[in-house]
Image: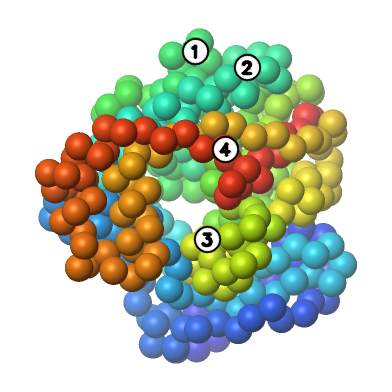
Amino acid sequence: MDSLFEYRNCPSCGQNSFEVLFESNMKPDDFNVLFDYSMEEHDSQESVEGYLVPGKEWGRHVKCKNCQLIYMNPMEKVSKTNEYYSKAKNTHAPTIRKSYLRTAESQVSLIQKYANGTNLLDIGCAQGFFLFGASKAGYTTKGIEIAQDAAAYAIREFGLDIEAKPFEELQFAENYFDVVTLWQVLEHVPYPLMMLKAVHRILKPGGLLVVSTPNIETIPAKILRKRWWDIKRLHINQFTTRTLTDILQNTGFKNISSTSYRGFVSLSILLTMMLKYLGVYEQLKALFNPDYVLGRILNKIMLVYSSKLNHCVVLGFK
Ligand SMILES: [Zn+2]
């Protein structure tokens, strides 16, 4: 059993003193399955079947007594989760494309307000929607994406420059980038302080870092606790605006502040998410899933929301 897990000190302050918030709900056998429901393969070319699944499995969550960061401890072995990410399927990309491209426009506007140069790196760039928006706005972009399928999509659809490898395996020159972005990535990273230190090194002096993660201090998270949709097996760090600010501070970033952007979601995706969360998706999926007629129509209706509803967004400078 122990060979499946890795214990961590607090991934932000490095101390090893914590209280247990809640225990894991996974049985020993669950950990032997590499691919869980949320990313399983399926036939459809355009589908959200395996996408946006609320967390039904989670590991033990603890809270650091020193800095209050909430993190999973133990977590699953890095080699195993990396294999999982690398093989994750990308069949939902056509469905989410329009809303993610619109979200990218407001993320790019945010960057434009603070960045001093145009050499930009996006770590965990997924299908490249944000990078495509940034390149249209005149940025010289580079992306890193461990999921082979999503990286191939970004290259094929948008002609982007993507490295389909883990960040740790790549070498970048010191003081090279003007901007580094981490959109919904740090909650997945086993040793986020180490990653942020490497990011700090490759940023130019005065360079901008933007990090966004789910926020465990939002009202839904407080009410739903371990039933909150962002408590899930692959989310091994749970930040708040304060703990995200702290980890940037611990890394050496300066002039740190919190911000937000406008996100877009189609009505069909929103309804699909709600049905999945309520556990009635299978019975009702023909109504809202964009793979079916009504869902296809609803997928054209865009709703706007503030990232504050579910995320913390923090920026800092080298
Ligand atoms: Zn800590």
Tell me the distance, in whole angstroms, between the alpha carbons under discs 3 and 1. Answer: 31 Å
Looking at the rendered image, the quarter that the C terminus falls into is top right
Residue that carries the numbered disc 4 in the rendered image? 306
Q: Secondary structure at mark 4?
A: strand
Residue that carries the numbered disc 2 in the rendered image? 112
Q: Position of residue 56 (x, y in %)?
A: 43, 73
Q: Position of residue 255 (x, y in %)?
A: 84, 31
Question: Which amino acid lies under the numbered mark 1 shown in the image of this protein?
Answer: Ala
Q: Residues within 10 Å of mark 3 (few under 14, many from 20)?
A: many
Outermost residue, right direction? 66
Whether residue 65 appears in this view of the structure is: yes
Residue 230 image label = 3
Q: Earlier in the sequence, mark 4 or mark 3?
A: 3
> Quick check: 41 above or below 151?
below
Of badges 4 and 2, nearer the viewer stands 4
Residue that carries the numbered disc 1 in the rendered image? 137
